[in-house]
Amino acid sequence: MKTLYTTLKYSAVTLWSMFVIAPFLWAISTSFKDFNSVTSGVSYIPWLQFEPSFEGWKVLTKPASEGGINIVEPYFNSIFVTLISSLISIILGTLAAYALSRFTFKAGFVKNSDITFFFISQRIMPPIVLSIPFFLMLGYLSLLDTLMGLVMVYIVLLMPIAVWIMVDFFNKVPREIDETALIDGCNPYQAFYKVVLPNSIPGLIVAGMFCIIFGWIDFFFAFILTFTEVQLLPVAIVALNSSITPWWSLSAAALVSVAPLIVVAFIVERYLSKGNLSGAIK
Amino acid sequence: MAKIEFKNVGHCYDVSAENKVYALNPFSLTWEDGGRYALLGPSGCGKTTMLNIMSGLITPSDGNVYFDENDITNVITEERNIAQVFQFPVIYNTMTVFDNLAFPLRCRKFDEDKIKTKVHEVAELLNLTEFLNKLTKKLTADQKQLISLGRGLVREDVAAVLMDEPLTVIDPDLKFKLRRKLKEINAKYKTTLIYVTHDQNEAMTFADNIIVMNEGNVVQIGTPKELFEKPKTTFVGYFIGSPAMNIYPCDAVSDDEVSIGGLKLKVNTKLPDSQKSNLKLGIRSEYINVVNKKSENTVEANINLVEDFGNYKLISATNDNIQIKVKVKRESVIPEDKILLEIPPEHCCIYNNEELVE
């Protein structure tokens, strides 16, 4: 019985892994092909089935004057915008979430839950609704086609995620922890950063990861709020396309663009499974 | 350390409401320095509210709180120098046991040498020395609760240590040891201890003064003996003692005799002249004697049930419609069906309007 269970379990995991990894393998294989290898029927293994070519990869670093499409600058732009906006969103979002979780706000019929919903509602709206206001606002501020403008827009988009996750997380951190810290002689700020925050690291990591993912993959706002000066990675990758689809360079670009997310996932995975909070109370 | 005084302190959570509902009705009370107090009452009677007012987590809507004559009603928690232990252990998970115990001292900027001595002293007292360098996550619930307690005891000058049912999560055996330890600490350091519980045994064995609360009111303050022998209200009679006090509606017949239904009983209380009917008589089941001869204040009753509790037997008997519970020694011989019971007049308490007539 136990062996059967183990066999089934491992088969299921293997199947799922294959399903997940297949697109990656396909992309890796394709990125080493050229026009001929792509069009001459199904093939997977370099050297055996087709002659590998590095054209797809070289194009990504060549300047436009040499017929390449350089994604190095957009890559760093994307990293900069994603990291800065995620960081600011997490800081502001965590503070807002702590306040929403611990203090009672009341303005007429507006209560804490309504304020929390207001934050989340920013993400419920279809993004296209926001495009014209954002465009006009950045226009007034002369921030169209700048990294600063994008950072500001992404903060608006990412902070609701941080607030949403952190409110939920702080609600699960027992209030007695704050109260004990106060009794032990902390002021409310010390109670927050000495006691509550260290207990909330798993939540911060989850929120940070979501912010990074949503910031990194955004195409829509990066596309409409930039023109020539500044380009982010998703836009640059789309710009690779031409009348003859360059599958090799698209694959290579796709691989380098998901790489940071995979690295982040590997780094934070162990923090997520640790469950730091279990046992803070009871 | 300090004398704590409540002057007309009361609390209502929603002050703006039209009909204010008090979680704690205004009352005055002095907690002597170095005393051991228990707050006893059923759930939702205002015990925790009272503690939170003392620690400053709640600012009372009415009245003032004094520590040694200083009005601290509006002083914030972190400046009150009070320690509080909650029902469930609250520990700082990300720190070691040592850092947990040192936390209140570090917050108050003690120097590290002093902190080290003090933490080791408290750890020794609570048998935590071997865990000092461990992360708190790995400890059991009762060890965690010891740490919570330790954080309260690590400060010498603390005004009072407030405990909100702190031993709920702890094994019965360890509970007993800890209670004794708390008593020792109180004796050694003269720390005022205030202990919230809904378990009367815990309150009786721990405190030298018990404050019984019900529905937001302080019902009676007294030593365990006073609460047992002269409960001030019928509520205290019901709530304290196991089984609860026998309480019967009665009418005054003369100034020292009452009748319960048809049954006439002498009492030692001088009955009020103004109120002849709607009185109540209370008698502890411990004070009722099983006798062989009929005399004054004896009642003949039919035995319904005899329960053996190991160290005593509890007889439930009826006379007409009057239910009588009698506690007897386990070795006493109990007749088959009928029993003669003596109700000693000196132990009868008379209640008028649920309050003791003295």
Image (cartoon, helix red, strand yellow):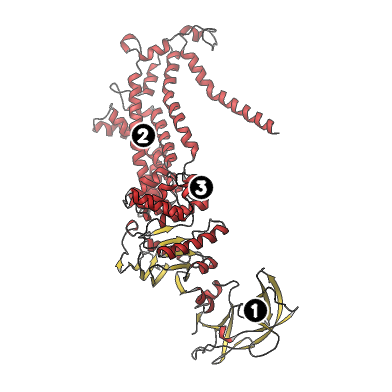
Percent of width and height locating residue B48: 44, 62
**The residue positioned farthest toward the bottom in the image shown:** B254
Give B235 or B12, whichever is nearer the viewer. Answer: B235
How far is mark 1 from mark 2, CA to CA? Answer: 73 Å
Q: Amino acid at mark 1?
A: Ile
The chain letter under disc 3 is B
Q: Nearer the viewer, mark 3 or mark 1?
A: 3
Mark 1 on the same chain as mark 2: no
Horizontal relation, residue B298 to residue A88: left or right: right
Element type where label 2 sits in the image? helix
Q: Nearer the viewer, mark 2 or mark 3?
A: 3
Question: Dot 2: few (<14), some (14–19), or many (≥20) neighbours within 10 Å?
Answer: many
Q: Amino acid at mark 3?
A: Leu
Element type where label 3 sits in the image? loop
- Label 3 belongs to which residue? B139
Question: Dot 3: few (<14), some (14–19), or many (≥20) neighbours within 10 Å?
Answer: some
Residue B12 in view (yes/no) = yes
The chain letter under disc 1 is B
- Label 1 belongs to which residue? B324
